[in-house]
Amino acid sequence: MKLLKGSGVAIITPFKKNQEVDFLSLGKLIDYIIEGGVQYIVTLGTTGETPVMCKEEKKEIIQFTFDHVKDRVPVIVGIAGNNTKELVKEIESSDINKAIAILSASPYYNKPSQEGIFQHYKLIAEASNKPIILYNVPGRTGRNLEASTVIKLANEVENIIGIKEASGDMLQCMRILKDRPEGFLVVSGDDAIALPQMACGMDGLISVAANAYPKEITSIIQYCLNQDFISAKMINDQLMDAYDLMFEENNPAGIKAFLFEMGMIQNQLRLPLVAASEQLQKRIQAFLK
């Protein structure tokens, strides 16, 4: 928990114009993020466009990330799915020995009951030799991971060590924080409301915005951990318009538009996602100026 308390980044996957993974840009982005002070990196999250990647590409990205990070910061690997049996096989066959943990979004589209979600996580946790971090993002999965289910998993499944909470429901977050067992990690998955969530007692943030603003996001989170919310708010206020722009159309189109304007990547996404609209791109340009 100590290693994962603070700022993490859900890193994007840069693509070339021919749609191949741009490993040169990925390496530069990893360096930029680490130099910005971020405590850890999450690779192969939704922000990394994993739904449109084949298994071989995922393996290459995992290995490249481990090799390029070189133990400078911990690495979390995203592995999720809505076919529990196949997900267990994927976890067992993935070369993730250098990962500190697995981040796994709750099963999407199937819309299981809370008991189904509990049994899904229980099975993958038992099959994994790495700790599991739950990921609640009902806007994408179609089913909320309720606070009572989180607490049940935290208490009953030893290998589940925390949650990335991205429901946007502050009351639910407060219930999890109130009832969590000692040592259970609770981090925000939403840049825009991370500051008030930290004030409620969260342990950090897995950020999208930190791809472009690692120093600023890290400063906000560290100020919050030190109970200096005035200093955190001063920086956060400067980024609030950026958060809106990043998520206005879709993620990661927004953050990729920022990184493109900063000269760090080519502005390429894979269908069904497309690059930010011309209008949004101009507003991002104006913000950056």
Image (tube, helix red, strand yellow):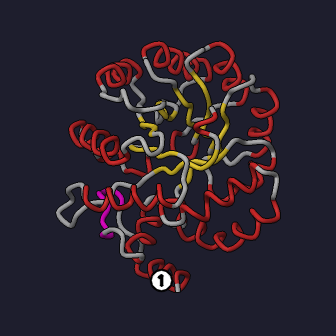
Spot occupied by residue 103 in the image (x, y as percentages of width and height) = 49, 34
Left or right: 196, with 113 as reference point: right
Residues packed near mark 1 inside 10 Å, few (<14), some (14 to 19) or many (20 plus)? some
Q: Is residue 38 above or below residue 167?
A: below
Examine the image and state in which quarter residue 117 appears.
top right
Q: Start and end of the magenta stretch?
A: 266-273
Residue at image coords 41%, 41%: 71
Is 170 included in the stretch rendered in magenta? Answer: no
Examine the image and state in which quarter residue 75 appears.
top left
Is 272 included in the stretch rendered in magenta? Answer: yes
Left or right: 239, with 46 as reference point: right
Element on which disc 1 rests: helix
Q: Which residue is mark 1?
A: 285
Q: Main secondary structure of the magenta part?
A: loop
Quadrant that contains the N terminus: top right
Amino acid identity at mark 1 = Gln
Spot occupied by residue 256 in the image (x, y as percentages of width and height) = 41, 66
Spot occupied by residue 168 in the image (x, y as percentages of width and height) = 68, 48
Spot occupied by residue 3 in the image (x, y as percentages of width and height) = 58, 37
Residue at image coords 53%, 16%: 122
Q: Is residue 80 above or below residue 260?
A: above
Residue at image coords 36%, 70%: 264
Front residue of 210 and 73 = 73
Q: Is residue 37 above or below residue 43?
A: below
Tally of numbered discs: 1
Residue extending farthest to the left is: 18
Residue at image coords 30%, 28%: 95
